[in-house]
Image (cartoon, helix red, strand yellow):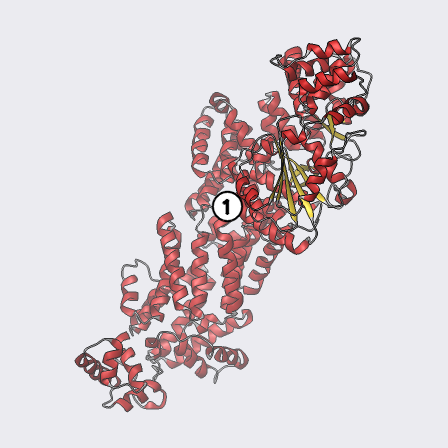
Amino acid sequence: MGVGKTSLSSWLTEDTAPYYTGYMNMPILSTKLYMPQPRPGYVPRFRLTGQLQQGLHRKLSLISAPAGYGKTSLVSEWLAGSPVPSAWLSLDDGDNDPARFLSYLLAALRTLAPELGEGVLGALQTPQTPPVEWVLSHLLNEWDNIFSGQCVLVLDDYHVIDSRQVLDAVGFLLERLPHRLHLVITTRTEPELPLSRLRARDQLTEVRAADLRFRSEEAAEFLSRVMGLKVGQEGMKLLEAQTEGWIAGLQLAALSIKGQRDVLQAIQTFNENHPFVLDYLAEEALNGQDTGVRSFLLRTSILDRMSGPLCDVLLQREGEAELGVSGQAMLERLERSNLFIVPLDAERRWFRYHHLFVGLLRKRLQAEEGEQLVAELQLCASRWHEENGFELEAFHHAVQAGDVERAALLAEGGYMPLFFRGAAAPVLAWLGSLPKRELDTRPSLWVMYASAQLIKGELQEAVSHLEAAERALQNMPKDERTSDAIGHAASIRATLAVSRHDAEMIMSESRRALAHLHPDNRAVRTATTWTLGYAYQLQGERAAAGKAYSEALTVSQSIGHGVITLMSMLGLGAIRQSDNQLHAASDWYRRVLELAGDPPIPAACEAHLGLASIYYEWNDLEAAEKHAAESLHLAPLLKHTDRIVACKLHLARVKLARNRIKEASVLWSQADQLAKNYHFTYQMKGLAAVRTALLLRQLRLDEAARLLRHDDEPTISLAKVQLANGNVADALSVLAQLRDAAEASGRADELLQVKAIQAVALYTCGSRDGGINLVLEVLDEAEGEGFARLFLDEGPPMERLLLEASKRSQMADYIGKLLVQFKGTAPLAKSHRERLPSGGSGKPPLVEPLSSRELEVLELIADGLSNTEIASRLFLALSTVKGHNRIIFDKLQVSRRTEAVARARGLGLL
């Protein structure tokens, strides 16, 4: 049967309020989730309800007919008598906003499975809606795991949907519908769904207008038992001919005929030649009411949904005589009279008018009372909704009243703007309807326009409207309101610069914003404090960044600004990580994931990326790969950012550490192409670093050197390439510069890595004591946080250095664990190994390294292949192979094959 009120008690508010907080932190109308209740005395249509019940094994039941054919009544009649549980969603124009539609869809499904979609709900409570298919995929997968029984999902009034995104969402939902979830759609128009394919597969039950028409016996029962009207056999035939079984027509005719002395004559008055039968009959029904009822109907017609207290506000306006009836009493009276009123909950507290009737009422209200009274009624409704905490509905009525000032104040939302809480679509629609002159006289509306578009990801439009705002602000008086608008505009500029990692722009605009924003504008101020923190982070001022993030976190938590709360936590995690506090950083990232839900909101991408980096450093490569893959999965949801490049690069590093060179190369190539296509210049250093690591692993030393040849600044990658090529002195020079810069700027993470490589370089060039002492210093700093890849990534030279350092250190356990992990690491570039001190061989290290081709030949020699076999394997001339042999022997300072193999093994080349 349909879901009752009690099943919603765990997540809806009290009976007096038809809302719960869920849609982007905005109140949700629970009345949209209630199946309309069949009226007492309704005429059952068992022939149709039986057809629907028998069609549950199919995917879709489509009830399609023009207005007034009883589509909704039929479905509610069926489900009220069915043992199958159902979820109901009454659609309206507002559901063309994908975020709102998905939120209400989730809310409807949660009437059956309250635990469904906790993570998805979190994603929908962010200003930028995640992709529809991502949300639905998670919901449907989760539904399969939670709900095993047969159930029905109803989308009522589907014809109001014209948004391409929402239409596609329903198509996606239908295509992937779980086996035991049956979809019902009621609509006045043919839906954009693959009906032919569904028919061919016996996946569609159809009920059309011809099926919905009352048959003779049904029409007679309706008129006599429901409407209390006796029309006789001749009158019945006339009405059937007039209305053709159209239920709304019968009801309207009955209402207009009631009280007529000559019923048959009244019926004959209405014939098929009348051009506006519906309007005529409806007007007759309206005109037949007494003054009190008529006034009530007209005044409350401005409401989409109404309750007794809300109607009272519209009926008892200041300066007018009371109508002598309460709103609740009148609603109950109208329902008893079958006057086109539909109950929305089992308790009969909330109602709406039939769509056919309300259109007429609104026309009559406008014609009889005029625009001024209609606007006053809209403002009364707006104030009631605001006082009762329903700000989105309050905003809607203010817009309908044409009160730009009030609509603007409601959109600004006091402590938190509506568009920060997910209502960007209705705010944008309103702003788009205003003439340019209105926006120019109120520049804060231009700023609001730009801010809402920024949230929706419409960056070009946001910039255009921001420029319009800044032009208009130049002509405004320099008061608090103007100053706050200037500050908000600057905050938007700072946010736009964040995705470009433009530290100078972020810093200047953030400071400008904070200087102008009103102290009470806490939502924008805390967002700006976060952007200021990010600018400090980019500039390496980590203490200042941490202070800004901490302040943003405290304020955002106090005002419920969830996005800034998460971003501040991510910032604090990044600061701790850059200070080599890996455990503290991982705690922050895990807190973000706890708040982000499951499935997580897109902002969790950065937390997964941070954890991937930390697990990589701890040499837990399985966990590192898992988090890197999760971050890459979420990255496309963060539109207009370079996160997908950062994620691919980090996953490539993990793959390389696991010796999956081909996979790492593919990831790097993809990241490189994306960076070029979208001009993600901030990622160029990271791209060069991963490319260098790949080339070194593949022994392509010349390419690595060429890649970094034109670097204007010293980099760790450059130092590594110089070491690999045997240019130890040059490497040490680069490392000295890097160390000085890191010490001066307080970049602890970079300093620790530079010192580790510096220790290897010193040890490689013969400064054993210098290398050992420095690596002991690095070990002392790294032990508490469990660093591992810091050492492992430097390969056999570091392994040999640690072996010697262990003899002079009190950190035997830590060094021992690192040495054990070296045994499981992938081999690094062999040219690194050949520069190790020679140990007990008595011969100095190689003066000139072997080329990659020479190493290939050497490996085949070690495998016992003859020169002819090597030539065939490598597609070389025999003379070329012999030439390689001579060069290899000269470099290894040997004269025979067996000596070459032994010498190479001693140097770690094989």
Query: Looking at the picture, how far across and down is residue 229, in whole percent?
Result: 80, 18
Q: Looking at the image, is 286 positioned above or below residue 871?
A: above
In percent of the image, x 24 and y 89: which residue is there? 894
Q: Which residue is mark 1?
A: 531
- The answer to whether residue 894 is visible is yes
**Along the line of sight, the residue nearer the viewer: 364 or 469:** 364
Q: Amino acid at mark 1?
A: Thr
Assess disc 1: are there few (<14), some (14-19) or many (≥20) residues with their C-alpha within 10 Å of its C-alpha: many
Query: Under tag 1, what secondary structure?
Result: helix
Left or right, 868 with reference to 631: left
Q: Quadrant of the C terminus?
A: bottom left
Q: Quadrant of the N terminus?
A: top right
Left or right, 724 with reference to 317: left
Count of number-bearing discs: 1
**Along the line of sight, the residue nearer the viewer: 393 or 357:** 357
Query: Looking at the picture, how far across and down is residue 279, in whole percent?
Result: 65, 16
- The answer to whether residue 35 is visible is no
Q: Looking at the image, is 457 positioned above or below residue 212?
A: below
Q: Looking at the image, is 60 positioned above or below residue 320?
A: below
Displayed quadrant of residue 374 = top right
Q: Looking at the image, is 489 positioned above or below residue 689?
A: above
Query: Looking at the picture, how far across and down is residue 723, in whole percent?
Result: 32, 72
Left or right, 324 with reference to 532: right
Query: Looking at the picture, how far across and down is residue 161, in whole percent?
Result: 57, 33
**Along the line of sight, the residue nearer the viewer: 467 or 674:** 674
